[in-house]
């Protein structure tokens, strides 16, 4: 394994794109020859250029696997650069890039699976998972479990799957933190959430919880970082419940380290998560977390040790845990300290890169 190609042609910036960039930089540090295949002028393309990562530009979509020209472009690129390892995390990239890599006889065709939802047992997927993909790296045991629900009925993919958690670069959280992006009033507790404004992320639950907390007379600010299609609906809810002074939609926040540092308590209201990376970010900043006891959250949060896990979708219980943390600074601090220690033990980026490197080399 010497020439590695990360393929991510998504046009927006999200967790998968951040992961590809971080992994590419870490493999470069380890003296691998690394390329990023991206779509022109995407956020990932721009960040790759800023970091002097070699790029190849192409745009892939759901139907690109039917486009012979796309195969030809990737075939020539893989052949020219003598690529021996390709790494994907999205289905459109995998379908076209995977078949192209197979034609060139690329040794390692790696799928980073990040969604904790079942794979459809289609003819195309059976070919991909049986004959094309050589390694599947799941970001949690819950992701692995859901991935095998349907496919295991027809093909054995379990021997290809390795669970490797996403890692975090703790150096970012150990640098001197600049002034917070929030101007915190001393008696107010700052609650925070980060993620796309979608039904899956559950920000509507957070606004209802904020209403419960306000009714109890608690002083707090709830800062929600992110953009998405639910923004108009969330804005309407905030106005209807008269929470304009308590709930703030921040929009996109680029400096997540400083955002996490500015909080007292982090809240994750998602109905499912393949791997709740924002939980790890909050724990890295020594913040206690309250989240639903669903999907992969229990793999990250140890209940009553690094945070609280709440039955889904029990808003009253969720509110009670927040109230406890608001009223007890000692518990907040202890859970935060425990969370930071858990990240140091389980989620350091360099350790996870080593785990991935060893997995690919051992199967090469």
Image: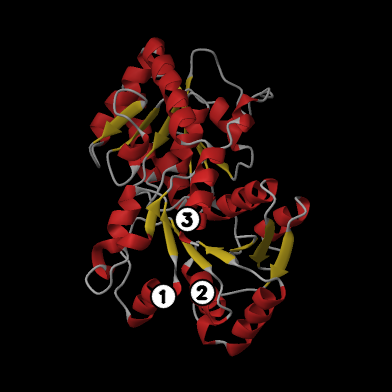
- Please tell me whether mark 2 sits on a helix, a strand or a loop: helix
Q: In the image shown, does 44 or 162 lie closer to the viewer?
A: 162
Alpha carbons under labels 1 and 3: distance apart: 22 Å
**Residue 348 in picture, x, y percent from top left:** 52, 35
Which disc is residue 362 wearing?
A: 3
Instruction: Give the residue at mark 2.
Output: 98
Can the viewer see residue 246 in this picture? no
Which residue is at a point 45% across and 29% down the rendered structure image? 345
- Which of pointers 2 and 1 lies earlier in the amino acid sequence? 2
Above or below — where is 297 with respect to 101?
Answer: above
173 vs 328, left or right, is right
Above or below — where is 242 with respect to 72?
Answer: above
Can the viewer see residue 54 in this picture? yes
Instruction: Give the residue at mark 1.
Output: 128
Alpha carbons under labels 2 and 1: distance apart: 8 Å
Which disc is residue 170 wearing?
A: none
Q: Are marks 3 and 2 in contact (CB under 8 Å)?
A: no
Which residue is at a point 58% across and 31% down the rendered structure image? 170
Disc 1 residue crowd, few under 14, some 14–19, many 20+, Cα 10 Å: some
- Please tell me whether mark 3 sits on a helix, a strand or a loop: helix
Please name which of the two marks, 3 or 2, marks the residue nearer to the observer: 3
The image shows a total of numbered marks equal to 3
97 vs 275, left or right, is right
- Please tell me whether mark 1 sits on a helix, a strand or a loop: helix
Disc 2 residue crowd, few under 14, some 14–19, many 20+, Cα 10 Å: many
- Which of pointers 3 and 2 lies earlier in the amino acid sequence? 2
Residue 268 picture quarter: top left
**Residue 32 in picture, x, y percent from top left:** 67, 54
Alpha carbons under labels 3 and 2: distance apart: 21 Å
Q: Are marks 2 and 1 in contact (CB under 8 Å)?
A: yes
């Amino acid at each position: 394994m010497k020439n590695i190609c990360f393929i991510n042609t998504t046009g927006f910036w999200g967790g998968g794109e951040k992961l590809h960039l971080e992994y590419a930089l870490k493999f470069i540090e380890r003296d691998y020859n690394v390329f990023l295949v991206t779509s022109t002028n995407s956020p990932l393309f721009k960040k790759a250029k800023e970091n002097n990562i070699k790029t190849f530009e192409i745009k892939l979509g759901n139907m690109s696997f039917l486009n012979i020209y796309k195969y030809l472009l990737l075939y020539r690129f893989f052949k020219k650069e003598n690529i021996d390892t390709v790494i994907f995390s999205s289905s459109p990239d995998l379908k076209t890039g995977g078949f192209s890599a197979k034609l060139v006889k690329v040794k390692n065709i790696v799928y980073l699976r990040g969604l904790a939802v079942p794979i459809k047992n289609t003819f195309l997927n059976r070919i991909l998972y049986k004959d094309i993909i050589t390694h599947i790296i799941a970001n949690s045991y819950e992701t692995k479990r859901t991935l095998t629900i349907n496919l295991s009925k027809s093909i054995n993919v379990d021997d290809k799957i390795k669970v490797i958690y996403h890692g975090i670069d703790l150096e970012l959280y150990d640098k001197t933190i600049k002034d917070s992006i929030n101007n915190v009033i001393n008696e107010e507790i700052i609650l925070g959430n980060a993620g796309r404004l979608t039904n899956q992320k559950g920000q509507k639950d957070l606004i209802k919880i904020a209403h419960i907390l306000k009714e109890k007379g608690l002083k707090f600010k709830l800062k929600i970082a992110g953009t998405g299609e639910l923004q108009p609906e969330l804005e309407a809810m905030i106005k209807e419940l008269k929470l304009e002074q308590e709930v703030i939609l921040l929009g996109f926040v680029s400096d997540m380290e400083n955002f996490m540092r500015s909080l007292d308590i982090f809240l994750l209201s998602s109905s499912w998560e393949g791997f709740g990376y924002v939980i790890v970010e909050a724990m890295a900043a020594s913040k206690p977390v309250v989240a639903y006891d669903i999907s992969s959250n229990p793999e990250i949060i140890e209940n009553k040790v690094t945070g609280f896990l709440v039955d889904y979708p029990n808003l009253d219980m969720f509110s009670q845990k927040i109230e406890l943390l608001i009223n007890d600074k000692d518990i907040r601090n202890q859970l935060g300290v425990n969370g930071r220690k858990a990240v140091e033990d389980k989620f350091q980026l360099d350790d996870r890169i080593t785990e991935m490197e060893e997995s690919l080399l051992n199967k090469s």
